[in-house]
Amino acid sequence: MSDPTQRPGEQVLERSKPEAKEPALYKVVLHNDDYTTMEFVIRILEDVFLKQPAEAYRIMMQVHVEGRGLCGVYPYEIAETKVETVHELARAHGFPLRASTEPE
């Protein structure tokens, strides 16, 4: 039943606030190969991932020694765009350099 002290038209309406969720993040990883030059990998890291020269060199050496190196963590769409950019630049310069995304 309704509350006898409440008059018609005096209902309290609450607005629900939509909860903003942080987007899922993905790692972008470069993979080692036997043909891509170290200089090209450094250039990719500086130009595509905006790394400083020292950081680009460190990641390049990680790729060279360990077989893979983390370039950054981004929302899915940005991570996929960066992977595609790496593949396009590598193809344009005749290198088989590969990159991939992994959920964080």
Image (cartoon, rainbow, N blue to C red):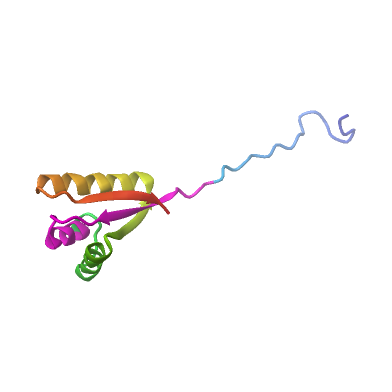
Query: What quarter of the picture does the N terminus occupy?
Result: top right
Residue 73 % position (x, y): 36, 56
Q: Is residue 43 magenta?
A: yes
Residue 9 % position (x, y): 76, 29
The front one of 22 and 68 is 68
Identify the residue at horizontal 15%, vertical 59% (top origin). Answer: 43
Q: Is residue 8 magenta?
A: no
Residue 86 % position (x, y): 21, 49
Identify the residue at horizontal 12%, vertical 62% (top origin). Answer: 39
Residue 33 % position (x, y): 19, 55
Identify the residue at horizontal 57%, vertical 42% (top origin). Answer: 18
The front one of 51 and 13 is 51
Q: Residue furthest front?
A: 34
Query: What quarter of the picture does the C terminus occupy?
Result: bottom left
Q: Quadrant of residue 88?
A: top left
Compared to 53, does 74 lie above or below? above
Identify the residue at horizontal 45%, vertical 48% (top origin). Answer: 23
Q: Which residues are magenta?
A: 20-46
